[in-house]
Image: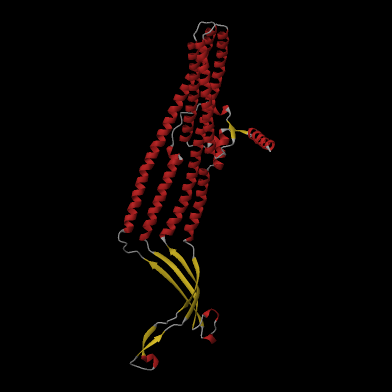
Amino acid sequence: MKKIILLTLLTFSIATNAQEVKELTLKEAIKFALDNKADSKKAKLNIKNSEYQIQEIRSRALPQISANGNVTYNPILQLNALPGDFFGTPGTTILAPLGQKWTSTAGISLTQSLFDQSVFTGLKAAKSTREFYQINEELTEEQVIERVANAYYQVYVQQQKLTVTDNNLVNTNKVKNIIQGQFENGLAKKIDLDRITVRVININSLRQQILNAITLQENALKFYIGMPIENKISIPKTEFEVIPQDLTIKNSSTDRNEYLLLKKQEQLLEFQKKSIQAQYYPTLSFTGNYNYIGQGPEMPLFAKPADGVYWSDFASIGLNLKVPIFTGFGTRAKVRQANNAIENLKVDIEETKLSLDLGFENAKKQIENSLITINNQKENVQLAQEVLNNTNNNYTQGLASLTDLLDAENALVDAQNNYTNAILEYKLAEIQLIKSKGELNTLINN
């Protein structure tokens, strides 16, 4: 039994370790998100639902046909006071029942709207609603792309920090081995060995923290793209090449989906106001009815004239005109509320335009600053590496202290991490600039 359990655990372990690691480019991550993320699916469903809304409004302009039927039993017939003249007894009043104990009716009715301003307005509004959700889908896609790209680059930063830490650990272990050998030969102090040993332990602890951070960032990326958390991924370094952007372009915030969505919402509010104003208009409709009725002392459904049950048909057609005259100023109040909602939205539109312009200018400035920082940090890394090499040589020759060597190592690590952060800031600013131009879809189309 123990052998079976061990074999099962071993098989599971092998299967887990053998799980394929998927190399995930930014384009693949975005496409995966657009196909699988809940936000994208809901946006597509909203477009489909808008088609149903159009069908619902359109149905109000089509004939409404219904069938009806009923069976009624009157255990006590109402007595009606009738002049006795009808019964040959003038000057008297006779209480006579009218109707039959059983009545059954079956029929069909038709109603056709001939003029209803609210229906015409509703059809236009429904089509605008569809356009609203189409713009909203594009905006949702842009938001998904932005979140995925930001999360994608955050993983890269942590991986680069791990690379820097690993290199630092290798170099520090080399120094430790040298000091270990010197200490064993009586050429180094124990305090120096202890200090370098503590540094190795600290670097290992930092490395574990970075590994945990990588796992968390990768899990966040998988969540943003809708990928199962247990899947393993890797990110190619070529995804993070710095390609200078064209900063001479002009902003066109009125072409952004955020702005277009609000303008479409403004149009919908205008239709809503017109729909309310339609209550001032008269409505005209055509109606037609055809019915078949059976009456008698017994249930008419299966009875015949011989049973005292008689069937007859009747029909009616007509025009219904409704002219509103006074509604207690309720319609006027609703129209004023609609106007107020439109004015509020116009304020939001102007605020959004200013925000989009600000985002565009800030993104360009951040790009410029990031490029300068990248170049400076790249030179700083090279200089820190030269300082470390010289300090290392001096230390092995006894011309520099361990403190100088450790300081040089720290300076190189800081420079490398600063360079990585500069690249991250550039890539994040690049996303914002592409977003400001309304071209986030180019990240999957290129």
Residue 145 visible at all: yes
Please determine whether, in this image, residue 224 is positioned above or below residue 97.
Answer: above
Q: Position of residue 1 (x, y in %)?
A: 69, 38
In what quadrant of the picture does the C terminus appear? top right
Q: Residue at x 51, y 41 (%)?
A: 141
Q: In this orientation, which residue lies closer to the viewer: 35 or 122?
A: 35
Q: In this orientation, which residue lies closer to the viewer: 252 or 129?
A: 129
Q: Position of residue 133 (x, y in %)?
A: 48, 47
Residue 386 visible at all: no
Please determine whether, in this image, residue 429 is positioned above or below residue 276.
Answer: above
Q: Position of residue 391 (x, y in %)?
A: 51, 10
Q: Residue at x 41, y 49 (%)?
A: 267
Q: In this orientation, which residue lies closer to the viewer: 97 or 268?
A: 97
Report whether 18 appears left or right of 392: right
Q: Position of residue 258 (x, y in %)?
A: 44, 41
Q: How is the image coloured?
A: secondary structure
**Residue extending furthest left?**
328
Q: In this orientation, which residue lies closer to the viewer: 120 or 416?
A: 416
**Residue extending furthest front?**
1
Please determine whether, in this image, residue 389 is positioned above or below residue 287.
Answer: above
The number of numbered discs placed on residues in the rendered structure image is 0
